[in-house]
Image (cartoon, helix red, strand yellow):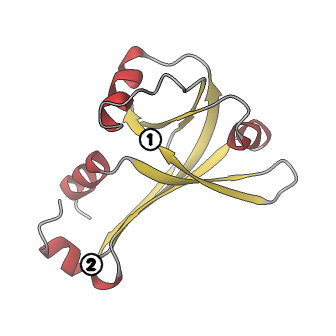
Amino acid sequence: MSGRQLAGYLERRSYALASSTRPDGRAHAAPTLFSIYAEAFWLPTVGGAVRLRNVEAHPWLALSVLEGDHDEHAAVLTEGPAEVLSVVPDEVWELTRRRNDGGSVDWATAWLRMTPQRLFSFAEVAWQESGSS
């Protein structure tokens, strides 16, 4: 994807598949709401969530953001160091509320912040030509 396509794609997608490693080494994946702020992905979650323990044991996350099928699909895959936070900037709360269609995110008692170290984006030609940007 071009830089403009990547930015537009991530702006209109609200959910990603977050992959982490359990303390015993087994893989764990779960869907999550995400926002992008200050060059990082911010994921709201609830206290006691498996992904929190996973990041505490192995401070790394991989995120997959996918859409479409066959010759009209696009994907963003990113990974990097992650940390568990209980306090986040007000801007992250507001941005995440907007990305959640104005719905509340007051249920979030913890947040994960992942700073991308690697990012791969891909879009099939038909996806690009369909006006997706």
Asked if residue 66 is positioned above or below residue 47 in the image, the reply reads: below
Residue 119: mark in rendering: none
Crowd rating for badge 2 (residues with CA inside 10 Å; few <14, some 14–19, many 20+):
some
Q: Position of residue 9 (x, y in %)?
A: 27, 55
- Amino acid type of disc 2? Glu
Q: Using residue 12 as the reference point, say whether residue 121 is left or right of it.
A: right
Q: Position of residue 51 (x, y in %)?
A: 69, 43
At horizontal 41% and vertical 22% (from top left) the residue drawn is 93
Label 1, label 2: how far apart the Cα atoms are: 23 Å
| Residue type of the residue flagged with mark 1 | Phe
Residue 99, image x and y in percent? Answer: 33, 37
Q: Residue at x 65, y 46 (%)?
A: 60
Return the residue at label 2.
72
Quarter containing the C terminus? bottom left
Image side of residue 119 versus residue 73, left or right: right
Locate residue 31 relative to residue 69 in the image: left or right: right
Residue that protrudes farthest toward the right in the picture: 24
Tell me the quadrant of the picture where the N terminus can be found: bottom left
Q: Is residue 13 left or right of residue 128?
A: right
Q: Is residue 22 above or below residue 102?
A: below
Label 1: which secondary element: loop
Q: Considering only order in the chain, which callout, 2 or 1, is on the residue closer to the N terminus? A: 1
Badge 1 is on which residue?
34
Q: What residue sits 19% from the left and 53% below the top?
A: 4
